[in-house]
Amino acid sequence: MKKEALFYEKLDERRVHCYLCPHNCVIEEGNIGRCKVRINENGKLLTTNYREIAAMSVDRIEKKPLKFFKSGSNILSVGTFGCNLTCDFCQNYSIAQITADQAHSQIISEAELVDSVLNTRNNIGLAFTYNEPSIWYEYMYETAKLLKEKNSNKSIVVVTNGFINKEPLEKLLPYVDAMNIDLKGFSNEYYSNICGGRLNPVLETIKLAAKKVHIEITTLLVTGENDNLDEIEELAKFLSDIDKTIPLHLAKYFPMYKMDNKATSIDFMYRAKDMAEKYLDRVVLGNV
């Protein structure tokens, strides 16, 4: 379903500038942005995934993963299609790396989704997850705002790659309770070559979000790419400079999507955990 997007400007009769995320796409008439869900039609930027739900489930909060936020609880979780990164190891590529014409989704209004949250038993709230929720911004923002108006005790969780500009992030954060942010590595080379993004915008997201909501960080340790202790040490130092109690999830990589590197060794996982624990109080191993 199409809806006029937020956070864009018209450059001329044929081009628009989207500034939702740090790609800052300049999109010609008839073309889509790098997220695969924002299209320029007649000089107007439209989002093509508005109200489109491609995945929906009640999950344990630990699956997000959030280990130190309302542990042991369940949360209704939803996702759409598309992503503004192109990670070679994408775990959810079947929905994250497709366009609107390839997607199988169901249209659910904000009010309908909020009703589902409120009527699901033993449910603490709503998680935007599975693909990258920031490119679902209009729907995510409106739904989160409506849920908080209906019941401020329900939690909003955002599981994100953190590749979002400051203005939209600041607008969203008052309606968010917790975030898990993927810090995919700690080098621009890794972000550029493997993920199709940049490191610094994600670091800025982490610094800003840490001031406003509960955050936990996930880093997938990919064999032969970002599995070195020096990088883990720099990453842990960065987080400890913000708050040494920020939880860090070090996740085991398995071959997926375009990448067939060997799975991360358990031995390295434990050595990485030991290194990170020199700087951080809460380091957790995942996918082991």
Image: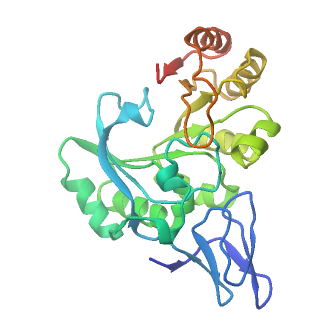
Q: Nearer the viewer, residue 194 or 74?
A: 194
In the image, is 269 to the left or to the right of 117? right
137 above or below 255?
below
The answer, for residue 174, to whether it is visible in the render is no
Location of residue 189 (image quadrant):
top right
Location of residue 255 (image quadrant):
top right
24 above or below 91?
below
**Residue 267, percent from left and from top:** 59, 8
183 above or below 270?
below
Residue at image location 60% in from the left, 65% down from the top: 36
Colour mapping: rainbow
221 above or below 145?
above
Location of residue 118 (image quadrant):
bottom left
Image quadrant containing the N terminus: bottom left
Residue at image location 35% in from the left, 28% down from the top: 71
How many discs appear? 0
Residue at image location 60% in from the left, 30% down from the top: 220
The answer, for residue 254, to whether it is visible in the render is yes
**Residue 197, percent from left and from top:** 73, 49
Residue at image location 65% in from the left, 51% down from the top: 85
Q: Nearer the viewer, residue 261 or 138?
A: 261
